[in-house]
Amino acid sequence: MLNRIVLMGRLVAAPELKTTSTGKSVTSFRIAVDRNYAKLGEERKADFFDIVCWNNTAEFVCRYFIKGSLIALEGKLQSRTYQAKDGTNRYITEVVADTVSFTGERRDKNNNANTNPSAPAAQPQMSAHNDFEEMPLDEDLPF
């Protein structure tokens, strides 16, 4: 059997770290994933996914990601039922992420103030013409 899911999207809200009664770290959050297409004359739509992270992964997410951050993750799709306070049975499907990664996106300090004091300082984006060193065309190529 195979149950793997890979997603990249933006956090809808800031993740919050919680601790279970047994001392395990956990966080749950939602991401918005843009669809790759849009109908002519319409705006691009997004799908929303509920994500759960445990232990070190949960701590990593809460430390380095804020609302609006672009996040890449890999995990498994899991469904479960629970009983709500009103006594009705509820069914939920969520992604249990075991691998979370930065996307390489950098934020400008002036336009996107970081509200998470424990997160690393934002770095300005590099312009496309500064990313690579020019190679003279008259020299032999190194390969």
Image (spheres, rainbow, N blue to C red):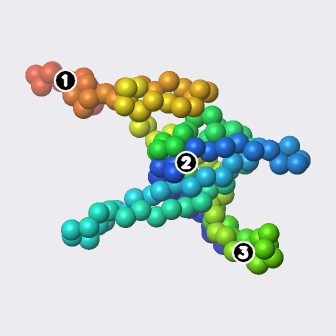
Residue 135 bears which disc, if any?
Answer: 1
Residue 13: which numbered mark, if any? 2
Report how far apart the C-alphas of labels 3 and 1 lie in the structure. 61 Å
Residue type at tag 3: Arg
In this view of the protein, which residue sits in the foreground, 5 or 34? Answer: 34
Give the left or right position of residue 43, taking residue 83 as reference: left
- Residue wearing tag 3: 90
Image vertical order of residue 5 relative to residue 11, above or below: below
> Residue 22: x and y, percent?
89, 47
Name the residue: 41% across, 37% down.
105
Q: Is label 3 or label 1 in front?
A: 3
Q: CA distance from mark 2 to mark 1?
A: 44 Å
- Chain-order first, disc 2 or disc 1: 2
Left or right of residue 64: residue 109: left
Q: Nearer the viewer, residue 141 or 129?
A: 129
With 44 as the anchor, is 13 left or right in this view?
A: right
Q: Secondary structure at mark 3?
A: strand
Res. 46 image quadrant: bottom left
Hey, what amino acid is under mark 2?
Ala
The residue at 64%/69% (across/down) is 93
Residue closer to the observer: 89 or 129: 89
- The tag earlier along the polypeptide, 3 or 2, is 2
Contact between marks 2 and 1 (CB within 8 A): the answer is no
Question: Which amino acid type corresponds to the residue marked 1 in the rendered image?
Answer: Met
